[in-house]
Amino acid sequence: MDDYGSMPSKTFLIVLVGCAVMAGCAPTPNLLANTPAPDGTVAGFWLGLWHGFICPVSFVLSLFMDSIHFYEVHNNGGWYNFGFLLGASSVLGGGGASARRK
């Protein structure tokens, strides 16, 4: 009989690492939602739509420039998120193109 003693099993380690990865990806509340940006504006649906359209370019630029951000944190919540999702899905393909091919 093998004595594993203090040696954790591979399954336990895999589950532990998986839980840590998933916890790291958990969403957190946006503490700046519904608060104005330094210029006094709060992004809404239309600005979210625009940010969704330009998200591929914004993402690449944000990798090299600290002044470019991928997502506006000073937003009004659900409507900004919906606009961003709608804009990003229209630019990135959305899923309708693959359904049309079948």
Image: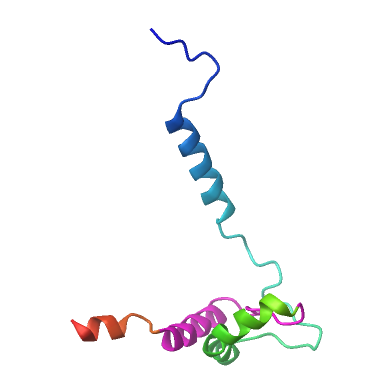
Which residue is depicted at the point 46% across and 10% down? 3
The extreme left residue here reads: 102
Which residue is depicted at the point 53% across and 20% down? 7
Residue 21 falls inside the magenta stretch: no
Q: How is the image coloured?
A: rainbow
Asked whether residue 34 appears in the rendered view, the answer is no
| Residue 46 at x, y percent in the picture | 56, 92
Asked if residue 99 is positioned above or below residue 1 in the image, the reply reads below
Which residue is depicted at the point 63% across and 78% down? 70
Residue 88 falls inside the magenta stretch: yes
Q: Quadrant of residue 99?
A: bottom left
Asked whether residue 70 appears in the rendered view, the answer is yes
| Residue 100 at x, y percent in the picture | 23, 86
Q: In the rendered view, does 49 fall on the left or right side of 93? A: right
For the N terminus, give its image quadrant: top left
| Residue 27 at x, y percent in the picture | 57, 60
Q: Quadrant of residue 40?
A: bottom right
Asked if residue 13 is positioned above or below residue 40 in the image, the reply reads above
Q: Which residues are magenta?
A: 66-92
Asked if residue 31 is positioned above or below residue 81 in the image, the reply reads above
Q: Nearer the viewer, residue 27 or 68?
A: 68
| Residue 42 at x, y percent in the picture | 69, 85
Q: Quadrant of residue 65?
A: bottom right
Which residue is depicted at the point 49% across and 44% down? 18
Q: How many marks overall?
A: 0
For the C terminus, give its image quadrant: bottom left
